[in-house]
Image (spheres, rainbow, N blue to C red):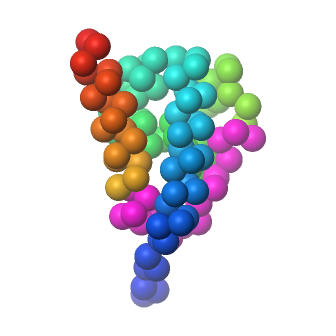
Amino acid sequence: MEKKKKVTKKRVAELKKIAKVRLKLWLKHSTFEEMTSLGSFIRFDMGIALGGYPMKDEPWMDRKDFLSVVDKNEFHSQEVNDMLRELFNKEYDKWARNN
């Protein structure tokens, strides 16, 4: 079995910028509640779509904005998951305070 390679901090920072752009697109066209189906991290992860958007496109989506930007190692890495979890928690906390 192939050993997983650690994702560099530089690469995680690049992916975080992409994730923030995608989050901004979502929040421009829907609410955090709608994007995440009432606060689901799994739905958030699918919406940010670093591995490509897995569902039917939303009417406002341009497919090129949600193409895969990670390889299999990055997609399954703890470093990328932690970064997404951090973004999610920040947005979830904002949403929870307002609801």
Q: Is residue 79 magenta?
A: yes
Residue drawn at x 51%, y 50% as measured from the top left: 16
- Left or right of residue 19: residue 87: left
Residue 58, picture quadrant: top right
Mark yes or no: residue 74 visible: no
Say how many tags the image has. 0
Residue drawn at x 53%, y 40% as measured from the top left: 20
Residue drawn at x 41%, y 36% as measured from the top left: 43
> Residue 88, relative to residue 8: is it above or below?
above
Q: Main secondary structure of the magenta part?
A: helix
Residue 44, picture quadrant: top left
x and y percent of residue 35 in the render?
46, 25
Most foreground residue, 55 or 25: 25
> Residue 4, relative to residue 42: is it above or below?
below
Q: Residue lying furthest top in this view?
A: 99
x and y percent of residue 2 in the render?
46, 86
Q: Is residue 56 magenta?
A: no
x and y percent of residue 83 in the render?
40, 53
* Stretch in magenta: 64-81
Residue 38, picture quadrant: top left
Mark yes or no: residue 5 visible: yes
On-image quarter of the C terminus: top left
x and y percent of residue 50 in the render?
56, 50
Residue drawn at x 32%, y 24% as measured from the top left: 94
On-image quarter of the N terminus: bottom left
Most foreground residue, 50 or 96: 96
